[in-house]
Structures are given as structure tokens and as C-alpha cells.
Image (cartoon, rainbow, N blue to C red):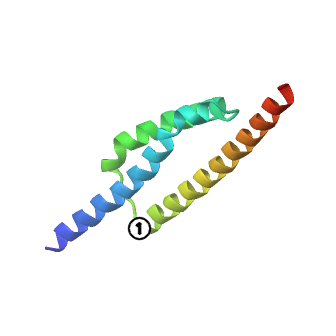
Amino acid sequence: MAEQSDSTKTDILGSRLRNCLVTILELQDEIERTHLGLALQSEFTILREAVKQIEYVCVEEQDVCRIEAATGRFLAELKENFNRAAVNSDSSARLLQ
């Protein structure tokens, strides 16, 4: 019975890790439209490969928690940058009118 719970825990941790990576990859098109796009191209390639290999990776709860926290910080920074870009875009559009 313990094996099944260990296996289930591993599956859950893998799913949580996959969710983090896929969330970032889903934003790739948006990110590539920014000044960060070129700089992060190789990182997106690495993330896509990591998603393919998730089932072979052994991770601990603390590792997944750190990755989830880092993903949250990354998303918050992106949101801040996108909001700033939208404000700058609105200001530029008003100046052109």
C-alpha cells in the first residue's frame, strides 16, 4: 500500500511541476512580442524538453514548492511588465492623436 501512496505522491508532484512549466510555455507567444522574446528563446526550448521528461524526473515536495514560488514571481513580474507596456502604449497613442 505504501508503494501506491509513494507513486501517487510522485505523480502529484510531477503534475504540479508540469503545470508550472506549461503555464510559462503558454505565455511564450506573448513574451516573444516583448523585448524579452529573443533573450528567452533558448529557455523556452529547454522548458519544452523538460516537460517531455517530467515523468522521468524525481522531485521532492520542497523542490516543487520552490519552483511554484519561482513561477509565481515570474508571472507577477510579467504582469507588471505587460501592464507597464500597456500604459506606455496608451500614452504613446494619445501623443500621436
* Residue at the top extreme, as displayed: 96
| Residue drawn at x 47%, y 39% as measured from the top left | 26
- Whole-percent x and y of residue 59? 39, 60
Count the marks: 1
- Whole-percent x and y of residue 67? 50, 58
Residue 48 is left or right of residue 53, and the answer is: right
Residue 88 is left or right of residue 74, and the answer is: right
- Whole-percent x and y of residue 93? 78, 30
Determine whether 10 is above or below 30 in the image.
Answer: below
Q: Label 1, on which residue?
A: 61
**Classed neighbour count for the residue bearing mark 1: other residues with Cα under 10 Å, few (<14), some (14–19), many (≥20):** some
- Whole-percent x and y of residue 60? 40, 65
* Residue at the left extreme, as displayed: 1
| Residue drawn at x 40%, y 51% as measured from the top left | 19
Front residue of 63/26: it is 26
Amino acid marked by disc 1: Glu
- In what element is the residue under mark 1? helix
Residue 44 is left or right of residue 53, and the answer is: right
Q: Which corner quadrant of the image does residue 39 belong to?
A: top right
